[in-house]
Amino acid sequence: MVTRAFIAFCCLFAWVLTAHAQLPNFTQLIEENSAAVVKITARENNSSRRREAVPQGQIPDALRELFNQRRSPERKAHSMGSGFIISSDGYILTNNHVVGSAKQITVRLNDRREYEAEIVGLDPRSDLALLKIAEKQLPVVHFGEPDQLKVGEWVVAIGSPFGLDYSASTGIVSAIGRSIPTARGEDYVPFIQTDVAINPGNSGGPLFNLDGEVVGINSQIYTRSGGSIGLSFAIPVSVALEVVSQLKEKGRVDRGWLGVYIQDVDKNLAQSLGLKKPRGALLAQLEPDGPADKAGLKAGDVVIGFNGQAVVEASDLPHIVGLLSVGEEVDATVIRRGKKRTLSVEVGARPGDDRVAAEGGGDTLGLEVAELDAEALEKRRLLGGVVVVKVYPDSPAAEAGLQEGDVLAQLGYQTLNDVNDYEAILKQLPAGTPVALRFFRRGRSIFRTIEIK
């Protein structure tokens, strides 16, 4: 007589066999694409730890620790990462944080050939870098359709975690459109979140769908241990394709810009602004004479659509605008005093983008700076100033001893109130002449001299 336990066992065994049969086989995908994945070793002249910069913008609590990891990584004498070949004549895509400060970059192929690579262009805002090696007829990857990726879809990462060459790991897409602002408060990348095991050394490597197409570039992990805990983030192919196109053409990336400060709409704000539910990007402030201001947008408007795309959360707006071409005219759908209206906006160029050149050297002092908000100024008891968010090696700023997190208050004989002051004064500085510089570090005022070579 057949027992109930035996029947239950048979049912369970049949379910396990069925489930196993439905799992994808990644063997062919990995075999066909591993040859186009490369290992990258980047060497620097010196090593130091980057100081923490002042945070800009609003950061979700769940991602605050990841944001802090991005702001204060350790700079080493050498770093390892991954990349992948995107054209047979030697163009390679990787992360900016892998090669951005490198003096020498070595690319190692799957067949153990090694090449010295040159930097074609860097884009710190998207954390992407384009390299070139002198070789032809190389194996290449193929990009997937930017808008086809779905949550729950299987994905595969190939890279060199902890220096272990050409390791593969699998998982699913956990979420799409994650916002992780940079130290400068910029938020141009709608990250793909996955549970794929990504570890140090995977940075810059490809993320494949089951069709063997690249859908993302592995960039960040959220971790408390230093290793993967199932929260990894990749740059979507939609961002990468635009960045590659511009870096090839001009060695830098120009992004669309509206000149607005935005915030999310909560339940109470939605009710007070005439919205049926919380959605959109609330315009808290506009730059005078900026693209949004010229188009007739006003503080208090809620942008719910831009260029035909829905704006559900505030972070959706910079993701859309950043991919638009400078000078492009698009429609913005807003709610103003409870009524919907559509305005035509000509997208502008983000100020300062022309300084992000192929060498990645920042401005003429070798700096990247950002605004200090009112709260940060009050905390430091300052009337004005700009915060240093990056110091490039072998630059005048590095020689002067400036560090990330320093607050510049005076350049030459002129006081700095904001980034506009800084940029205006920078244009007037003479070359070959030491100039007085005053800055604050941990509340202490320090004078140094700085000289443009």
Image (tube, grey):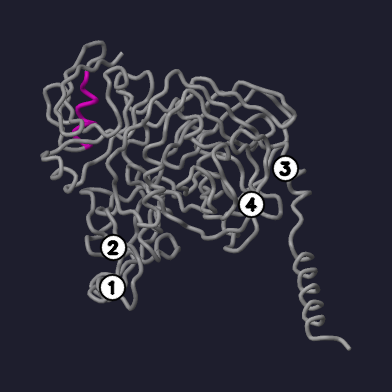
**Residue on which the image places disc 1:** 270
Q: Position of residue 98 (x, y in %)?
A: 51, 33
Quarter of the image with the C terminus is: top left
Could you tell me what secondary structure mostly forms the magenta stretch? Answer: helix
Mark pair 4, 2: CA separation: 33 Å
Q: Disc 2 vs disc 3: which is toward the camera?
A: 3
Instruction: Answer with left or right where residue 316 lies relative to residue 109.
Output: left
Helix, strand or loop for disc 3: helix
Mark pair 2, 3: CA separation: 44 Å
Which residue is at the front of the view, 58 or 279? 58
Helix, strand or loop for disc 2: strand
**Residue on which the image places disc 3:** 33
Amino acid type, label 1: Ala
Amino acid type, label 4: Gly
Q: Residues within 10 Å of mark 1 (few under 14, many from 20)?
A: some
Mark pair 3, 4: CA separation: 14 Å
Height in image: 106 above or below 380? above
Q: Position of residue 3 (x, y in %)?
A: 82, 86
Mark 2 or 1, nearer chain start: 1
Q: Which residues are magenta?
A: 419-429
Amino acid type, label 3: Asn
- Residue at 52% of width from left, 60% of height from top? 175
Q: Disc 1 vs disc 3: which is toward the camera?
A: 3
Which of the labelled discs sits on residue 282, or is there none?
2
Q: Are marks 2 and 1 in contact (CB under 8 Å)?
A: no
- Give residue 203's quadrant in the image: top right
Is 421 covered by the magenta stretch?
yes
